[in-house]
């Protein structure tokens, strides 16, 4: 059975992506979460309400031993399942001016986005290489494309994710594994709830924030056979703010 692993799938973009992949492709969804089990269960309930299947898979993407243990145990228990789609979505923000940023805020943001990408992808890609197929989709950000004041750590993490996407895509293209990134702009989620939407949308040519489902549809396309010749790309989805 083909599966999709979505990291940080308990809320926001991760939840929308997990639900959409189940709807569009009939994939068995592994709903990864770090701490918020209740929210993860809500994601799984929505997947099942739409006729899909899946299960929860808890691990903190920052810790390689934890990632490997969780995934290896799952693979041993499910020898007929194959993670054919990986969405590296887990990410956090700890905004603040660089000159007074606590070291922990720098480390936590980079360790979640870019070390998390390394930890999870290195485990999952082994089976993709053996089977000579796979889709890896990394959720970056407009912050990683243009840099955002007050987000030096987040911009660094997402910029690194974009560069990693381009490099890894070249390494595994001959194995028919595609690696792409999606770079959302301002999307209405928990992560943006404290922002002044009325003020910020004036910067956006479309004059509105995006919604999580719009990002999920793009990820779903990149997970499909329709995108088989697209790899190493970063697709912006931001209402024209970075065009």
Image: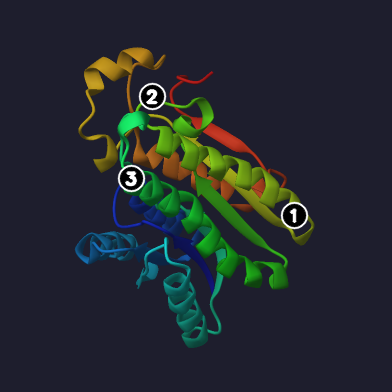
Name the quarter where the N terminus is drawn. Answer: bottom right
Q: CA distance from mark 2 to mark 1?
A: 33 Å
Q: Residue at label 2?
A: 149
The residue drawn where x is 33% and y is 60% is 50
Q: Residue at label 1?
A: 171
Q: CA distance from mark 3 to mark 2?
A: 15 Å
The residue drawn where x is 37% and y is 41% is 213
Q: Residue furthest right?
A: 174
74 vs 120, nearest the viewer: 120
In the picture, measured across the screen, residue 167 lies left or right of residue 211, that is right
Q: What is the count of numbered marks?
A: 3
What number is the disc on residue 124?
Answer: none
- The reply to whether residue 46 is visible in this rendering is yes
x and y percentages locating residue 134 in the rendered image: 64, 61
- Return the disc, 2 or 1, that comes first in the chain's sequence: 2
* Residue 203, picture quadrant: top left
The local secondary structure at tag 1 comes to: helix
Q: Looking at the image, do the residues carrying marks 2 and 1 touch, with CB atoms under 8 Å apart?
A: no
Q: Residues within 10 Å of mark 1 (few under 14, many from 20)?
A: few
Q: Residue at label 3?
A: 105
In the picture, measured across the screen, residue 17 lies left or right of residue 194, that is right
Q: CA distance from mark 3 to mark 1?
A: 32 Å
Which of label 3 and label 2 is nearer to you?
3
- Return the disc, 3 or 1, that comes first in the chain's sequence: 3
The local secondary structure at tag 3 comes to: helix
The local secondary structure at tag 2 comes to: loop
Compared with residue 29, is residue 237 higher up or lower down, i.e. above or below? Answer: above
Q: Looking at the image, do the residues carrying marks 3 and 2 touch, with CB atoms under 8 Å apart?
A: no
x and y percentages locating residue 188 in the rendered image: 29, 34
* Residue 161, picture quadrant: top right
């Amino acid at each position: 059975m083909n599966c999709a692993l979505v990291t940080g799938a308990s809320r926001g973009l991760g939840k929308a992506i997990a639900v959409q992949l189940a709807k569009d492709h009939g994939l068995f969804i592994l709903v990864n979460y770090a701490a918020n089990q209740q929210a993860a269960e809500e994601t799984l309930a929505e997947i099942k309400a739409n006729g899909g299947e899946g299960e929860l898979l808890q691990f903190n993407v920052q810790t390689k031993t934890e990632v490997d243990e969780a995934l290896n145990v799952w693979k041993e228990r499910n020898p007929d399942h194959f993670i054919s789609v990986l969405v590296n979505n887990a990410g956090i923000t700890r905004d603040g001016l660089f000159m007074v940023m606590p070291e922990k805020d720098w480390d936590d943001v980079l360790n979640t986005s870019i070390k998390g990408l390394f930890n999870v992808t290195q485990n999952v890609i082994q089976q993709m290489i053996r089977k000579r197929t796979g889709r890896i989709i990394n959720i970056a950000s407009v912050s990683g494309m243009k840099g955002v004041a007050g987000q030096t750590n987040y911009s660094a993490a997402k910029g690194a994710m974009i560069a990693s996407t381009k490099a890894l895509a070249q390494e595994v293209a001959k194995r028919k594994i595609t690696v792409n990134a999606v770079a959302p702009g301002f999307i209405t989620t928990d992560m943006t709830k404290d922002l002044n939407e009325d003020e910020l949308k004036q910067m956006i040519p479309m004059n509105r924030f995006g919604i999580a489902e719009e990002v999920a549809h793009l990820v779903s396309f990149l997970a499909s056979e329709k995108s088989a010749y697209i790899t190493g790309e970063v697709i912006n989805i931001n209402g024209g703010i970075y065009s």
